[in-house]
Amino acid sequence: MWQPNRLEQERLDKLNQIEARGVDAYPARVHRTHSAQDAIAAYEAAEQAANGGEPAPVAVIVAGRIRRFNVKGKVSFMHIEDQSGRIQLFLRINDMDEAVYSLVQEHLIDNDDFVQATGTMMRTKAGEISVRVNDLTLLAKSLSPLPVVKQQKLEDGTVREFGEFSNVETRYRQRYADLAVNADVRDTFVQRAQIIRAVREVMDNEGMLEVETPILQSVYGGAAARPFTTHHNQLKQDLYLRVSFELYLKRLLVGGYRGVYEIGRDFRNEGVSFKHNPEFTMLEFYKAYIDYSGVMEITERMLEAVATAIHGKPEAPFRDHLINYAAPWPRITMREAILKETGIDYMQYPDAPSLEARIREFGGRVAPGQPWGKLVEHLLGEYVEKKLIQPTFIIDYPRDISPFAKKVTYDDLHVERFEFYIAGMEMGNAFTELNDPRDQEARFLEMARTFRPEDDDAAPIDEDYLQAMRYGMPPNGGFGMGIDRLVMLITDQHTIRDVLLYPHLRSTKDNEEEASPVDEI
RNA sequence: GGCCCCGUAGCGCAGCGGUAGCGCAGGUGCCUUUUAAGCACUUGGUCGCAGGUUCGAAUCCUGCCGGGGUCACCA
């Protein structure tokens, strides 16, 4: 139940006064002719055409939210904001119906209200292109004031801000207010959409088909991750929210598509951090007749295209770095990378006990009894990952932690798998996909054998997937990448929460109290 | 989950054992070209919640709730 605070009560009182004057505070129809940006551009064009003389009148109707409000007696100024930007309104009692102006002068109209202004373009004495208003219509009364952020335009063109809306919890819980107040936050999500569009365009140009596969799955798999569980009441069936798309997508290659991709949500029941959210957006693709080298080339093309789409060139700043996405990126084997940073050649310790001992000797802290591949991965994560600032492929991963990748030709311990790293973050994972159903079954069984009950991220065996593979799966290369992390990189945001409109937060007591009566109905 | 930090007016913050303050926003008044408009006056707080210590707690202690960081876990 809403308990209006004092400021809200004042606005409610104003709303009553407005309606008492016969003004509709929430009209249905708007008659906008120009965005803020278009109105300014139109006037600039008229000035150019006038060549120093009096420009031809430019009539406009603009609409937006009031972001600055300066009543100066019988003349007032306000800035309204729409998606294109801000524009100043110049209101003078002589130019308009006094009853309308009185709404402004008596401050019945507030910051944050949506208004429509009819008028002609002009320049104020201070030189700002503005609308000389002869009619002002309230479009929507705002009852809860937004945080006030004042802006000062400096001579060098930059904007200084006074006051801010920065409490991260409130910003995430009330993202609408965050977006309404912070234009840079709005921009980030515009860029996010552009990035996803660029990714999709690259995929389409590679000749791949965009598909959708089940989110609710009775058998989950394709990644080492704990799932969320749910239940279908009528079917009396427990279901999992997918942790990857992999197994469903590769079935489609059996079906005859040369390449498929999906951009969608994955759900992993794990920790939350600056780069982990329980639900996140993933891109996966599988393309027939290419191996992981081919996938690396597509990866380079894709990231180049995305960076260029946003920044106009294949580079983008992230933290203190300028990341250069231009191909080709270095390809370093896992063995070389770890050797370089730690001096440990893990091939001299080809079994888990000896490698574990070597890591301990080196000063590393590892849980006892881990598989060999996990230990190798630990070395990479602990000593190499943070140093991989510029885009880098780490290739040839341990076989025992890669159940869907084909073996390399040179030994039995490695598979044709790569992960790529940028700005010290793991960005994606790819392999030459295993397509021998006997080998795949053996890998599943091997994973099941090393399964420990406390390790509930071990996936169950997907018999239907094996059946699909027995019909014949073309050789193919596959790829997965976290879109959210990509957006972080390209937009220089340092936490995943700032590239998700609604990042996961704990529910508050208030939410629970409000939600419960609905369930009881 | 461990450890550390934070939660004070709508927003941003100060106060850190003597009973709550600043800026912006808000209200009233003046102002017909302002732009962080200005001037004068002014309203506004269960100091996250619950206990405890104390003559006295926003301030110290404990627990809980929420957030952030970090480690663990995890791609």
Image: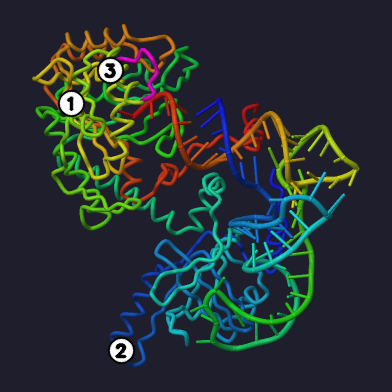
Q: Residue furthest front?
A: A361
**Amino acid at circle 1:** Asp
Residue A373 part of the magenta segment = yes
Residue A5, image x and y in percent? 71, 54
A18 vs B36, left or right, is: right
Residue A449, image x and y in percent? 31, 6
**Which mark is first along the chain, 2 or 1?**
2
The Cα–Cα distance between marks 1 and 3, rounded to whole angstroms, is 18 Å
A205 vs A44, left or right, is: left
Residue bearing mark 3: A355
Total numbered labels: 3
Pick whichever, A93 or A377, lies toward us.
A377
The Cα–Cα distance between marks 2 and 3, rounded to whole angstroms, is 80 Å
Residue A469, image x and y in percent? 18, 14
Residue A5 part of the magenta segment = no
- Does residue A501 show up? yes
Q: Relative to A516, say whether A190 is above or below.
A: below
**Amino acid at circle 2:** Ala
In which quarter of the view is residue A261 placed?
top left
The Cα–Cα distance between marks 1 and 2, rounded to whole angstroms, is 68 Å
Packing grade of label 1 (10 A; few <14, some 14-19, many >=20) is: many
Residue bearing mark 2: A50
Residue bearing mark 1: A396
Q: Which residues are magenta?
A: A364-374
Pick whichever, A101 or A5, lies toward us.
A5
- The reply to whether the C-beta atoms of the residues labelled 2 and 3 are less than 8 Å apart is no
Residue A63, image x and y in percent? 47, 67
Position of the C terminus of chain A by quadrant: top right
Task: Respond whether the residues carrying marks 2 and 3 are from the same subunit.
Answer: yes
**Which mark is first along the chain, 3 or 2?**
2
